[in-house]
Image (cartoon, rainbow, N blue to C red):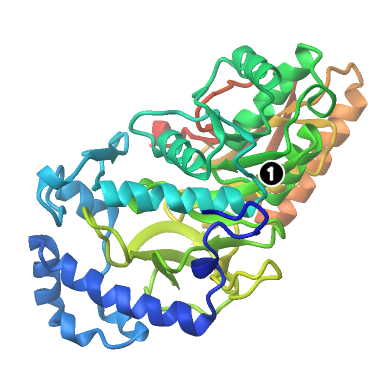
Amino acid sequence: MINVNSPYFNPERETMSRQQIEALQLERLKQAVRHCLTNDFYQKKFEEAGITADDIQSLADVRKLPFTTKQDLRESYPFGMACVPLRDCVRLHSSSGTTGNPTVILHTQKDLDEWANQVARNLWMVGLRPDDVFQNSSGYGMFTGGLGFQYGAERLGMLTVPAAAGNSLRQIKFIKDFGTTAIHAIPSYVTRLYEVMKEQGVDPRRDTKLKVLAIGAEPHSEEQRQRIEEMMGVKAYNSFGMSEMCGPGVGFECKEQNGLHFWEDYYIVEIVDPETLEPVPDGEIGELVLTTLCREAMPLLRYRTRDLTRVLGRSCPCGRNHIRLDRMRGRSDDMIVLRGVNIFPIQVEKILMQFPELGNNYLITLVTEDNNDQMIIEVELAEPTDNYSLIENLAKEIRHRVGDEILLKPRVRIVAKGTLPVSEGKAVRVVDKRKVYQ
């Protein structure tokens, strides 16, 4: 029986000491390695690395294990990395596969139960309880955000509204009529929802019972999160997940909002240099690498996520000692290289969100002109204006500040509200047209 007055959904696991966490991790790592070796893919990997399961005697020995990549999953499509018979699997999720075979992840019923427990733990951590109403404005189907939060919210005991993505007018009606207190949505869609609320004369503070937003699935800056909180009048908590690790629930902020708690009873977390693949010191940005510890159908060893982050700490005022990571700075494979400079779109967003005169929609376009690569930033105004002096000064200041941040001067275009394309899925922030000219 869950104690609704407790700040912990699973006190035994959430409040473990570092010593207890690491002891449990080592026990589960040894089991996970032996389980992986029932699969031909990992048998071959271990033979190539010249190691056996007996070589794993400490947590530090995780670095002896081979890395697993998205390409490995694609080449093993569809079921080549299964570690149980298909008759023991009850569901699969997959990526879109727009650049080749999709990545397929299999789940047993136990995998799904543990996944639901992780998500419920996260939602409980930010104050949600069985008497809350949870509206899931996320895609269902192969995308894990829908079903992952759905089953987690149900496991916690909330009334759930599987609204799915899009149809903003219906979303707002549900929020008002059902007394929704919590929403899960991607950040760009929350800002879209707020725009529609304004058009309909709905004040989220006055006309709804909202108190919690769970946002994730696309990189967003701290400035974007703060703007969302100001617009909606509620706390917005950052969520991290990926289908290869089940989906949402891998990491989540607590009420302190001082980093993502990654649940180390389910995962071993490493931060490595994406070039050398060697560990980086705490506080230094590197690529997130995750090893699953409890998965039956498709355990993954040292999976290279390509997400860039850093370790913030291993304790928290909330009482949880699971590792805390910074918000994702972007993906190593999403990095823009412009005239030899490495740039992440979130660096630009961070600057744009500092201007109250600007809206939330922006687009970065890369072009080649006269054999020189250029960056064009288009950003919408928050409200219509005929003050062309204001627009001109805004463009100059943005060009200056972004130039200081990325060390290159972009071209900046301030456009009218509603000019740029709006997506109800993940927002498209970068369009690279340079290949057209090559």
Q: Examine the image and state in which quarter residue 140 appears.
A: top left
Residue at the spot 54% in from the left edge and 24% down from the top edge: 424
Q: Position of residue 404 (x, y in %)?
A: 74, 55
Identify the element where label 1 is drawn: strand
- Does 243 sit left or right of 11 as displayed? left
Residue that mark 1 sits on: 236
Task: Decide which of 302, 156 is in the foreground and name it.
Answer: 156
Q: How many marks?
A: 1
Is any atom of residue 369 visible in this view? no
Q: Examine the image and state in which quarter residue 304 appears.
A: bottom left
- Does 428 sit left or right of 194 as displayed? left
Residues packed near mark 1 inside 10 Å, few (<14), some (14 to 19) or many (20 plus): many
Residue at the spot 25% in from the left edge and 39% down from the top edge: 92
Residue at the front extreme of this rendering: 1
Is any atom of residue 314 visible in this view? yes
From this view, report whether residue 365 is shown above or below residue 319. above
Q: Position of residue 110 (x, y in %)?
A: 28, 51
Residue at the spot 81% in from the left edge and 13% down from the top edge: 201
Q: Position of residue 171 (x, y in %)?
A: 61, 19
- Does 364 sit left or right of 425 as displayed? right
Task: Decide which of 425, 251 is in the foreground and name it.
Answer: 251
Amino acid beneath label 1: Ala
- Does 116 sit left or right of 93 as displayed? right
Q: Examine the image and state in which quarter residue 436 appears.
A: top left
From this view, report whether residue 294 is shown above or below residue 75. below
Task: Decide which of 84, 133 is in the foreground and name it.
Answer: 133
Image quadrant holding the C terminus, namely top left
Q: Position of residue 172 (x, y in %)?
A: 67, 18
